């Protein structure tokens, strides 16, 4: 055995128990009451929880967007992930017009390979299905990229017809489609009206996308998936009506999945009235308290099976472009380093069980997105692990974060407990506040949906 983690409380999505954990060649090799230490390095977990590393299934690293590029590249973004206990990221390869799905993946992978600190994979965000490009989804599935995304908004959003064709194709080739669901026409209408009236502050970003704008799109997307009998994954669900629609579809037996993000669980739309409100501008915007509560309830019921971050940070000077006009604020916020600590703090303070945090952040994203070697503490799986210190209070400040951004929307939020040590395939990448990972050690993960 290369490494033994002694005296930990192993936490899985279904149970917790005291055991030693042995690692060989980056894999979990043994789990037992007591393991022989001969020849192995030893880490003493001293009764602390030992959890699977988290999987962030929704990041935008080095993403060209909003007139700039998101500030974390594949090195700094995955460094921040590692330091927050996230040991796999699923980023987006945004297809260019005329490109096959695999060409988009290879183009992005060329940026990521040699830079990522932890393992990674891509969803393809589809723009163009003309000619044979729709069929090129099949090639991607065969090459271990079985998930795609469509946007119903932004200048690269797809029409309803394209979305429907993508869903149908996914049903035929066994892929999973994610959707950013908001009604683009309604947003345009409200935005034009506000700008005409001189209502240009950050709060009007939120008001131009009222709750029903997201809910209506959620419902439409769900109806199409239902009509085709294909699974659908709604990213960054933020509104109460949408939660209701997802719950109803799931109760009726449809494979409708939804993810939400920590910022929708922590903040409400009141943030848009703060002096730094523009830093919270993201789409869909953060909604009211009823929606925040509805998201937590859906998590507890199991109707929201995953948490991801939508990590897409922009520097303050870029956010400032929208001081006089909210439409000029690049949309997106940071979260990659905060997700797992935030959800584990929720477990530590009794809001959800630890097992639930593992299910939401590790085992469910692994299952849904076909990461067969990730997301659980089982012999044979990758030794992506977090030793968590529940007694360590941690107040988030940007200087303690490992992102390449000059601010975080999480500034000043105190968490109860924090990851102490993080391992990626058996290598320590973070220990007690220090990043110890290696640029380029992260590998592309081929995926197969079950
Ligand atoms: O505001 C956001 N969410 N920015 C990133 C792109 C997206 O919509 O996911
Ligand atoms: Zn989105
Ligand atoms: Zn996103």
Image (tube, grey):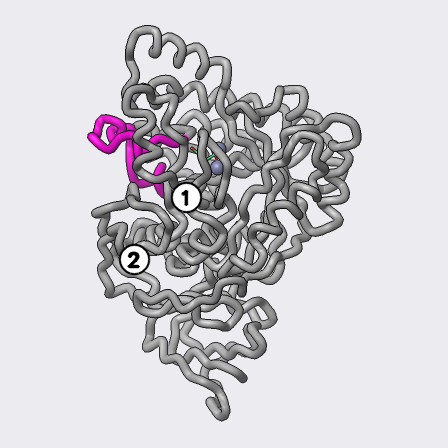
> Is-magenta flag for residue 263?
yes
Q: Considering depth in this image, is 354 or 29 the residue closer to the camera?
A: 29
Residue 155 lies in quadrant: top right
Does residue 450 appear in this view? no
Give the farthest residue toward the bottom. Answer: 38
Q: Quick one: label 1 or label 2, which is nearer the N terminus?
A: 1
Q: Is residue 253 left or right of residue 359?
A: right
Looking at the rendering, in which quadrant would you find the N terminus?
bottom right
Q: In what element is the residue under mark 1?
A: loop
Q: Considering depth in this image, is 136 or 45 the residue closer to the camera?
A: 136
Q: Considering depth in this image, is 228 or 206 the residue closer to the camera?
A: 206
Which residue is at a point 57% across and 72% down the rendered structure image? 27
Residue 283 lies in quadrant: top left
Task: Give me the disc on residue 71.
Answer: 1
Q: Position of residue 244 (x, y in %)?
A: 45, 28
Specify the segment rendered in magenta.
262-282
Q: Position of residue 186 (x, y in %)?
A: 46, 13
The residue to which callout 2 is attached is 348
Q: Is residue 383 left or right of residue 389?
A: right
> Is-magenta flag for residue 291?
no
Q: Residues within 10 Å of mark 2 (few under 14, many from 20)?
A: many
Query: Does the Cβ of the disc 1 residue fall within 8 Å of ligand 1?
Result: no
Q: In what element is the residue under mark 2?
A: helix
Which residue is at a point 67% across and 20% down the rendered structure image? 161
When the figure is inspected, residue 59 is found, relative to residue 49, above or below; the finding is above
When the figure is inspected, residue 128 is found, relative to residue 183, above or below; the finding is below
């Amino acid at each position: 055995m290369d490494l033994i983690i002694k005296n930990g409380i192993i936490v899985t999505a279904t149970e917790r128990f005291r055991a030693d954990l042995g690692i060989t060649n980056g894999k979990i090799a043994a789990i037992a009451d007591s393991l022989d230490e001969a020849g192995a390095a030893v880490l003493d977990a001293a009764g602390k929880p030992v959890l699977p590393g988290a999987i962030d299934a929704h990041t935008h690293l080095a993403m060209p967007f909003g007139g700039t590029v998101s500030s974390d590249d594949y090195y700094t973004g995955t460094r921040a992930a590692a330091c927050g206990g996230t040991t796999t990221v699923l980023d987006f390869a945004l297809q260019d017009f005329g490109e096959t799905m695999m060409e988009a993946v290879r183009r992005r992978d060329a940026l990521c390979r040699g830079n990522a600190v932890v393992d990674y994979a891509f969803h393809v965000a589809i723009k163009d299905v003309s000619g044979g490009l729709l069929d090129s989804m099949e090639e991607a599935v065969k090459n271990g990229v079985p998930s795609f995304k469509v946007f119903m908004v932004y200048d690269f959003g797809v029409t309803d017809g394209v979305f429907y064709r993508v869903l149908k194709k996914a049903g035929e080739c066994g892929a999973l489609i994610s959707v950013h669901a908001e009604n683009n026409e309604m947003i345009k209408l409200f935005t034009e009206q506000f700008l005409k009236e001189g209502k240009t502050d950050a709060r009007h970003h939120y008001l131009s996308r009222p709750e029903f704008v997201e809910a209506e799109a959620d419902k439409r997307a769900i109806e199409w998936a239902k009509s085709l009998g294909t699974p659908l994954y709604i990213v960054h669900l933020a509104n109460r009506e949408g939660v209701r629609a997802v719950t109803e579809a799931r109760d009726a037996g449809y494979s409708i999945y939804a993810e939400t993000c920590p910022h929708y669980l922590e903040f409400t739309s009141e943030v848009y009235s703060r002096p730094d409100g523009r830093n919270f501008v993201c789409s869909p915007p953060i909604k009211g308290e009823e929606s925040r509560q509805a998201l937590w309830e859906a998590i507890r019921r199991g109707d929201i099976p995953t948490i991801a971050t939508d990590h897409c940070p922009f520097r303050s000077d870029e956010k400032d472009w929208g001081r006089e006009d909210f439409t000029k604020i690049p949309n997106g916020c940071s979260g990659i380093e905060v997700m797992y600590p935030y959800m584990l703090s929720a477990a530590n303070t009794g809001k959800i069980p630890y097992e639930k945090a593992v299910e939401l952040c590790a085992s469910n994203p692994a299952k849904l997105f076909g990461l067969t070697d990730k997301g659980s503490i089982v012999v044979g799986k990758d030794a992506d692990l977090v030793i968590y210190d529940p007694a360590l209070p941690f107040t988030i400040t940007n200087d303690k974060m490992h992102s390449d951004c000059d601010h975080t929307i999480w500034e000043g939020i105190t968490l109860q407990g924090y990851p102490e040590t993080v391992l990626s395939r058996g290598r320590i990448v973070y220990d007690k506040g220090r990043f110890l990972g290696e640029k380029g050690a992260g590998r592309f993960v081929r995926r197969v949906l079950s």
